[in-house]
Image (cartoon, rainbow, N blue to C red):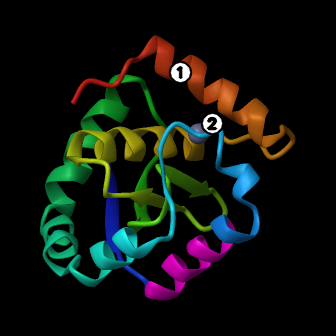
Amino acid sequence: MIYIKFKYNLIKELKMAQMLLRSPEHFRNLRLVSWPNARTFWRIVTSGGLIRYFKRSEFEISNFLSEKLAKIGSKLQGDFTCYLHFIGPEGRYNPERREIQANCSFGFVNFLETLWHELLHLEYYNPELSEDENEVIVGKIEEKYPFEP
Ligand SMILES: [Zn+2]
């Protein structure tokens, strides 16, 4: 069983915005990115309801993902933190901190799929491989076990 605690942190959000503005080239080729602009800042200002919704849904979402992980024989256990974002790519992961970041502005199904993807990163992370090589590994797992919401 895993449990994902959802948090929103404005400093993390601003750091994400800063990263996108400083190195846009790292993000341009990604499938989905919300850039820091007037629209995304307005979304943050009006995000209270959505953030409360995710916090209330922690248990259901964690159970849903735990069941999926159990089906693929996952060894992930315990608590994880997910920082919600309205700016940035679909997701990011930090295995040392048992932390993921997920953009919740691309719809609920995309959000769940992102959590799944980042959890797979935490499970299969190999520090000796590059970011791209780790991506290939997770891509293969996803091919084998396509995400079904
Ligand atoms: Zn990835």
Residue 14 is left or right of residue 20, and the answer is left
Q: Amino acid at mark 1?
A: Ile
Q: Which residues are magenta?
A: 10-19
Q: Residues within 10 Å of mark 1 (few under 14, many from 20)?
A: some
Seen at 21% across and 62% down, the residue is 58
Label 2 packing within 10 angstroms: few (<14), some (14-19), many (20+): some
Measuring 47% from the left and 38% from the top, which residue is drawn there? 117
Residue pointed to by mark 1:
141
Residue at the bottom extreme?
Answer: 11
Considering depth in this image, is 103 or 141 the residue closer to the camera?
Answer: 103
Magenta segment, prevailing SS (helix, strand or loop)? helix
Ligand 1 quadrant in view? top right
Which disc, if any, is residue 124? 2
Residue drawn at the location 38% of the way across and 66% of the way down:
86
Image position of 48 with respect to 2: above or below: below
Let me know if residue 13 is in the magenta part. Answer: yes
Q: Secondary structure at mark 2?
A: helix
Quarter of the C terminus within the rendering: top left
Q: Give x and y (percent) for residue 127.
A: 80, 46
Q: Position of residue 95 (x, y in %)?
A: 63, 56
**Do tag 1 and tag 2 residues touch (Cβ < 8 Å)?**
yes
Q: Is residue 23 above or below residue 130?
A: below
SS state under label 1 = helix
Q: CA distance from mark 1 to mark 2?
A: 9 Å
Residue visible at 43% across and 26% down in the picture? 73
Q: Which mark is residue 25?
A: none
